[in-house]
Amino acid sequence: MGLEDNIFLEKGVLATNAQLVERACKLGELAGRTIATAADARELLGLTKHV
């Protein structure tokens, strides 16, 4: 299940995509993970930034 499959932040409270991403990042950090920046993700995936 991806973020796009969930529309609630909690029971009865609709979430925005930004809120869901913030929660995912927080959970990752609590699990001891480092959160990639957009630049990190582009580098990991071998993508170039379009200007």
Image (cartoon, rainbow, N blue to C red):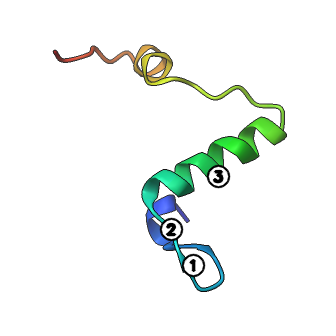
Marks 2 and 3 close (CB-CB < 8 Å): no
Q: How crowded is mark 3: few (under 14 residues within 10 Å), some or many (20 or more)?
A: few
The x and y percentages for residue 8 are: 55, 75
Instruction: Give the SS element for disc 3.
Output: helix
Marked residue nearer the N-terminal end (2 or 3) = 2
> Which quarter of the picture shows residue 49?
top left
Which residue is rendered at x = 51% and y = 23% of the image?
37
Q: Which residue is nearer to you in this view: 23 or 49?
A: 23
Quadrant in which the C terminus is drawn:
top left
The x and y percentages for residue 17 are: 44, 57
- Measure how far apart labels 2 and 1 are at the Cα level: 6 Å
Identify the residue position indicated by label 3 in the image.
Answer: 23
Identify the residue position indicated by label 1 in the image.
Answer: 13
Instruction: Give the SS element for disc 1.
Output: strand
Q: Residues within 10 Å of mark 2 (few under 14, many from 20)?
A: few
Marks 2 and 1 close (CB-CB < 8 Å): yes
Marked residue nearer the N-terminal end (3 or 1) = 1
Identify the residue position indicated by label 2 in the image.
Answer: 15
**Amino acid of disc 3:** Arg
Compared across the picture, whether 25 is left or right of 2 comes to right
Residue pushed farthest left? 51
The x and y percentages for residue 40 are: 50, 17
Q: How crowded is mark 1: few (under 14 residues within 10 Å), some or many (20 or more)?
A: few
The x and y percentages for residue 44 are: 48, 18
**Amino acid of disc 2:** Ala
Q: Which of marks 3 and 1 is in front?
A: 1
> Which quarter of the picture shows residue 13?
bottom right
Quadrant in which the N terminus is drawn:
bottom right
